[in-house]
Amino acid sequence: MPRSPFLRTYAPLLGFVYVPLGVLALALGTDHKQLAITLFTGATFAFLWFLGSLHARIMRYDPDGFFASIVVLGGASLIAIQAAALGTRSAEFIAPAAACGATVIIGSSLAAIGARKVRPVIGRLGIAGGVAVFLLGICEAAADWTFVGSTFWASSLGFMIWVLVTATYLSWGEFARKVPSAAGAERARPGLRAG
């Protein structure tokens, strides 16, 4: 069965669905547990499709699959551990969740740097962001600290900011390939003129 170009084009946009649903779920988890779990279920669905699109892109960058495997493993583990943290309202789960999020960020950044798909400074900023998410998660767990309420952790917010940036990058690349500019179309066929 051939792959749908529709899914390849629009799956990265689900990162933009994951973030607001995830933020609302974590923010409401303190007082509205059932609503938070419901929102987090939608966020999980969106994130897994986003993760699939990220995996496909990294496989193009890194054909042996090392970084793609690390990213998928980290992303799937992140969602499971965040769900446990949300359900139990326990900061003890957030350090492992932050480690998983940092793995996704750093693995993606290293793959993009290695394939020369981003400028080295941008890749290094991604690595620094991953390290920051990791260290923040450790501090949150050690101090039993949350950003807001009892279920909104700053390390989770840091990861979600990275998802927004990455979803923008992935979507921009897909749309640029699907919708060429008029000037680009003319340059691509210099002998033909529009009538």
Image (cartoon, rainbow, N blue to C red):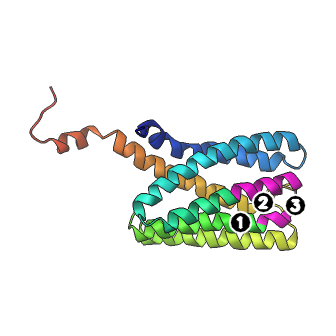
Work out how far the residue at label 2 is from the one at label 1, CA to CA, in angstroms: 10 Å
Q: Which residue extends farthest top?
A: 195
Disc 1 element: helix
Q: Pointer 3: residues within 10 angstroms few (<14), some, or many (20+)?
A: some
**Amino acid type assigned to the residue bearing label 1 in the image:** Ala
**Amino acid type assigned to the residue bearing label 2 in the image:** Trp
Q: Which residue is the site of mark 2?
A: 153
Q: At which x and y percent is residue 92?
A: 85, 66
Q: Which residue extends farthest right?
A: 31
Mark 2 / mark 1, whichever is N-terminal:
1
Left or right, 151 with reference to 117: right
The part of the image, by quadrant, that contains residue 153 is bottom right
Q: Which mark is residue 31?
A: none
Is any atom of residue 50 visible in this view? yes
Boundaries of the magenta span: 78-94
Is any atom of residue 157 visible in this view? no
Left or right, 178 with reference to 138: left
Left or right, 170 with reference to 39: left
Q: Is residue 40 magenta?
A: no
Q: At which x and y percent is residue 167?
A: 53, 50
Q: Which residue is the site of mark 3?
A: 90
Q: Which mark is residue 98?
A: 1
Q: Which residue extends farthest left?
A: 191
Q: Residue at x 78, y 46 (%)?
A: 25
Question: Could you say which is closer to the camera, residue 70 or residue 157?
Answer: 70
Q: Residue at x 47, y 51 (%)?
A: 170
Q: In what quadrant of the picture does the N terminus appear?
A: top left
